[in-house]
Image (spheres, rainbow, N blue to C red):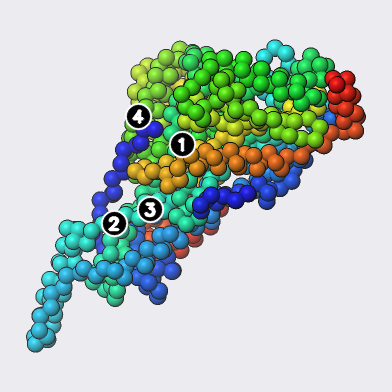
Amino acid sequence: MTLPAKPRPKTISYDLSEYLFFSPNTTGLSGSPVKIRADLFMDFFCNVDPQTHDGQSVIRDIESLKIFGKTASQNPRVSVPARNQSEAHKSRLNRVNQTLNILSFNQSISPEKTFYTKNVRVFYRVLQMEGDSFPTVYISDIRVVRHGSGEPAGLYEYVSSQFNQKLAKAKNTNLEGKTVYISPAFDGAQKAMDEAAFKTGTTKSLLFFNPPSIAEDLGIWKPPRLSDTTKSAISELTNLLQENQKRKVSWFVEGEGAAVLARALAAVPGTLETHAFKFLNARTNLPSLLQALKEKKAKLEGEFLNYTGDRTALLSIAQNPEALYNQLKQLPAPKGYDCVTRRYLLDFFQALGENGNAKAILAKALSVKGSTGTFIDAITISRRSLK
Amino acid sequence: MKFPNHLTGPQFSDGDLVSFLFDESELTLRIPKVPYNRDTMDRVNPQKDFRNPDTSDWDHFGDEGHCTTYLSIQSWRYEDSITHDDIAYAHLKVEVLKQSDREAESCFALNSATFYRHFIDGIHGDFVDSKRDERPYWPTQENNFFAKAIKREYIDGLQVQLDLVEGKKYPTPCAYFPLGRHYTLRIAFHFGSLHYEDRPNPYSEELLQQFKLDAFDDFLSHIRIEYTPETIALIQKLKAKQQ
């Protein structure tokens, strides 16, 4: 199995006002306080659902970091005999201590540690900063680490008999008249193929399988970081598009599959006039993807764009609704009954873009900084409102 | 079933009993309760009565009238109860296969020996290139795809291991049970150990592969097939004729 590149932690933020308590259980009433950087909100929101067993395990595990804080207090402080009690002296002393605090954080005097729980990797330090009564755990980064079974990305097809149904890498890459399901990030190819049958409504569709690392590499809320697995998926899809440029192909694209397609399209010269695309819960920058498809004269007909309650997809729509609306408006004029469908599609996605709850979550992500509440409270409230 | 170490996941013995009715039998499965996690699949065919079914939307293949449809498709993950790490994923697919008219007329499915022979010969034919392999756990013609009969009161089922997903490191356990002359139950249990970046799975491959086989046996042990009195009479008549 080829392991993806080792993830690098995000840049450590030095502004302590960006940190807030992780959850009501980590405010320091028992064990050390645990604080987390506020701008991790969107990543955490999209990847950890406190209403699931998985999500609750992750939260409980992160809360358990409060036992680590007791061990370390490495905060350098300047102490001088308290003979000079003047305000000016106190002020100077405070400034010196503040500078030392920042330096200790910047220069990693307290080493950054890593903690794993399920699919989440937590980067933290134990520090006692200005205003902290006790050594406090500062979570500076959380990375959602995907795991997979090692099956390679690419085009798969069924070879059926009454004795078995084998899922094999497609030898024939001629896609004339075929429907191809570009999967979201899935654990295994078999699961993705079964999903393809339900989503496309035919057991004859081909599968373009995307393994779990795709989701991490092409996430919406952080800069892309392409591992070899993701590069190979993009390259294979690029080749398929180029090889079948003049053939009639229907593509059904779901979730992170849209992000792989967006990357592949960028490397395909010429047009895709005989290619029809349908999207479900696209987890990518949708306006840019539609723009690319429009330039390639691809067919975007009927209900080519759909959304069925995927939170990440909704938030990506709500992030830039005007751009999406403009792209939809600029598509070639539909014919016949498609005029009605297009009108409904525009109304639907305009409403999604203006979804108050989604907007509120995006606003919450900005406002959580400096908030007196806890990070998990903010996540839970936002999750409830998005139902 | 006792899970090894701290592994947790759905127990088949706690699953919901779901029945499907066929012309010559009634099938009852223990459908595992899939935990509400992210990225799980939990589909059970809403159609429960398969007497004289409309097979037009089934998956058809070959030119003899064979077709299949799913009864249940479920996926879940096994995790470690201490570390909460995801350790392995499971994908259980239960299908019904409609035999051809010629096969139904031959009544091959109503006798353990002919049922076994029909499927094992077909598997040998499908995997004609898998003569032998250096890996002792890999199914080949040489080891008869690890075929073993699943003992039942009237007609035995068949269990094998097959290479069903290209690129997978370990084979997939599969099972077949006759549901009468016209239909066969076909089951595949896809299972894979999960790997996090930079971390080896704390459970060894040997342990997980053994667990896969044990869990599959456990699922099969809960399958109940009750044939109609007419079918039982026919089974016994064929048996007497053979003796």
Regarding residue A43, the answer to whether it shows in the image is: no
Mark 2 and mark 1: Cα distance apart in space? 27 Å
Mark 4 and mark 1: Cα distance apart in space? 18 Å
In the structure shown, which secondary structural element does the residue marked by tag 4 occupy? helix
Mark 3 and mark 1: Cα distance apart in space? 19 Å
Regarding residue B92, the answer to whether it shows in the image is: yes
Say which of A276 and B50 sits in front.
B50
A144 lies left or right of B35: left
The residue drawn where x is 76% and y is 26% is B112
Type of the residue with mark 2:
Lys
Within 10 Å of disc 3 (Cα), the crowding (few <14, some 14-19, many 20+) is: some
Chain label for disc 2: A
Q: Are marks 3 and 4 in contact (CB under 8 Å)?
A: no
Q: Position of residue B217 (x, y in %)?
A: 64, 39
Chain label for disc 4: A
In the structure shown, which secondary structural element does the residue marked by tag 2 occupy? strand
Type of the residue with mark 3:
Tyr
Label 2, on which residue? Answer: A113
The residue drawn where x is 52% and y is 22% is A168
Type of the residue with mark 4:
Lys
Label 3, on which residue? Answer: A116
Depth-wise, is mark 4 or mark 1 nearer the camera? 1
Label 1, on which residue? Answer: A149
Q: Is residue A374 above or below residue A341?
A: below
Q: Are marks 3 and 1 in contact (CB under 8 Å)?
A: no
Label 4, on which residue? Answer: A231
The residue drawn where x is 42% and y is 14% is A243
In the structure shown, which secondary structural element does the residue marked by tag 3 occupy? strand
Type of the residue with mark 1:
Ser
Which numbered disc flags the more N-terminal residue, 4 or 1? 1
